[in-house]
Image (cartoon, rainbow, N blue to C red):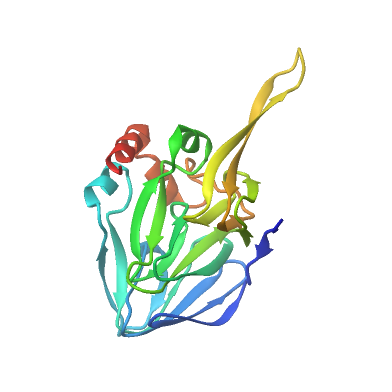
Amino acid sequence: MATPQLHPTTVHEGQGPGVGYRIEGELVPVLHLALNGQMSVYFEHHVILWKQADLEIGMHKMKGAFKRAIGGMPIFMTETKGAGEVAFSRDFPGQIVPLPIPAGGSILVREHQMLAATGNLEYTFQRAGGVGSMLFGSQGFFIDRFDATAGDGVLWVHGNGNLFDINLAAGETIDVEPGAWVYREHSVNYTQKVYGLKTGMLGGGGNLVFNRFTGPGRIGLQSGYYEIMGAGANNTVGKVAGAGVMGGILGSMLSD
């Protein structure tokens, strides 16, 4: 069976459609992009570190604005276009990795872990999938979805700690601690596995919950625990979680 492999912590030179990139830094890494004027890049506004003055900044609209608002998710993303360089970084230690998405492909990503994406990728969302996923999956009600509907694209994600990649063959499974996964290909099936722990007649008991993934497809794992329902290192997470259970349920129903 395949085992997780560490992503390179540094990328000296990479290439996507209309954009070159490099990733530098070991503790709080930085993503540098060089746009050639033919492709825009969108991102959350608070992750930009610096840009060359010639690059334009605007808003990147997304589909399903009403559904996103009901679910407590952002309606707009920030976008840059033109020719020049720009850099992005999160405010806490981790690792940045590029995820090339071929035309027709799609990647599902835990909320608030995307860093930037080429403008030709469609950014939507879907429900986590089932009550068990929402209550025990430690990921919130929704999962970000990126689809390459207009040719090849690149998505850059930030993981807490180090990021590992595992490619499961058809039928292969792996149980992952709920806070440890970052992304998965759409072909990967996702359920919960709950182990009941008993300590004896006079002792208590509890449950140990895993996310069970079944191939075929890739999964990204992070070594730092991530709890979407807590404030954690990123205060934005806490604000989104504050949208409440009712907002999440309503958003789930509307996303069908």
| Residue 55 percent coordinates (x, y) | 31, 81
| Residue 62 percent coordinates (x, y) | 27, 59
State which quarter of the image contains the C terminus.
Answer: top left
Which quadrant of the figure has residue 250? top left
Residue 161 showing in the rendered view: no
State which quarter of the image contains the N terminus.
Answer: bottom right
- Which residue lies most toward the top here? 201
Work out whether 251 lies above or below 25: above
| Residue 210 percent coordinates (x, y) | 61, 40
Work out whether 15 lies above or below 246: below
Residue 139 showing in the rendered view: yes
- Which residue lies most toward the left here? 66
Q: Nearer the viewer, residue 2 or 109?
A: 2
Left or right of residue 79: residue 181 = right
Left or right of residue 215: residue 89 = left
Q: Residue at x 68, y 64 (%)?
A: 5
Q: Residue at x 37, y 33 (%)?
A: 245
Which quadrant of the figure has residue 80? bottom left
| Residue 229 percent coordinates (x, y) | 47, 40
